[in-house]
Amino acid sequence: MNDLKNLPCPELATPEAETSSDEQDEVYGLSSDEEEKSTEDLAVKRRSSFHNLRFRAQKHLIGRIVKSRQSIKPLIGKRAYAALKQFENLLKSHKTNQKEVKVLMGSVVKTIGKLGVVAKQSNLTEDQLALARTTKQQFYKIALTIISFVRTDYTYNQTHLAQLLRDCEQTLRICVTEILSSKSVDRINRVFDTLCEPKLMDSVFSLNATVEQRTNLLELTKTLESIVASRRS
């Protein structure tokens, strides 16, 4: 028994210091402030995702519903609606392929409808808003140019008008590239390609135009004058 008492005691390993709860938070988890921020960020992302999904659904629905001038009348107002109708009549009197006119007008109507949804939802960035304002100014400049060509003989300049149209197309395309689908952007390109056809422009402003062609152009010009006047007042 005495021999047992005299046996040397084995040395015990010194336990490592325990990591404090604060240190564990830093190494393994997030602080309460970080957790709260992470939760808020997740909520924002979910709301943004839901908003974008709803926005895409609205654009898709607009694309299916908007198939005539009448359907976009509330978006563009009476004067622009009248101008669109007169523009179609003008195209019909100058183009022999009426199916082509129908397709073109369908593209115009769908584009206006989708842009209307974008504007209503206020989904444009500051840069896109600036581009939208520039596009609007370019449209008015085109309108003034057309008025000048019609009201003053021998002022028609195909190159000048084509350049104005292309400038407007480029601004509009940059503005909507991140908003609309590539199909919608292609639709915009086709519309401007048609408008810039030299043969079409020469025919529209020809002094030898038929009575019907001249009447359609004068009606469109009167409406454009009304739109420009309302902007200045």
Image: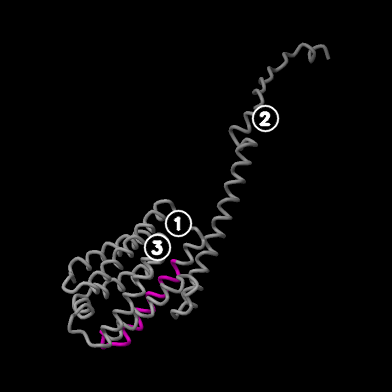
> Which residue position is annotated with label 2?
21
Where does the C terminus fall, quadrant-wise?
bottom left
For the residue pair 55 and 87, the one nearer the viewer reads as 87
Q: CA distance from mark 3 to mark 1?
A: 23 Å
- Look at the picture and state if 173 lies above or below 73: above
Q: Disc 1 or 2, which lies upstream in sequence?
A: 2
Q: Residue at x 59, y 44 (%)?
A: 38
Furthest toward the left, the residue is 154
Pointer 3: what residue? 231
Q: Position of residue 33 (x, y in %)?
A: 62, 36
Sort mark 2 into few (<14), some (14-19) or many (20+) by Cα contacts within 10 Å.
few
Secondary element at image label 1: loop
Q: Residue at x 22, y 68 (%)?
A: 161
* SS for callout 3: helix
Between discs 3 and 1, the one toward the N terminus: 1
| Nearest to the observer: residue 20 or residue 174 | 174
Question: Which span is picked out in magenta?
Answer: 94-115
* Residue type indicated by callout 2: Ser
Using the image, tell me which numbered label, if any, was put on residue 124.
Answer: 1
Using the numbered discs, state the Cα–Cα distance from disc 1 to disc 2 in whole angstroms: 47 Å
* Residues at circles 3 and 2 in contact by the CB criterion of under 8 Å: no
Residue at mark 3 to residue at mark 2: CA–CA distance: 68 Å
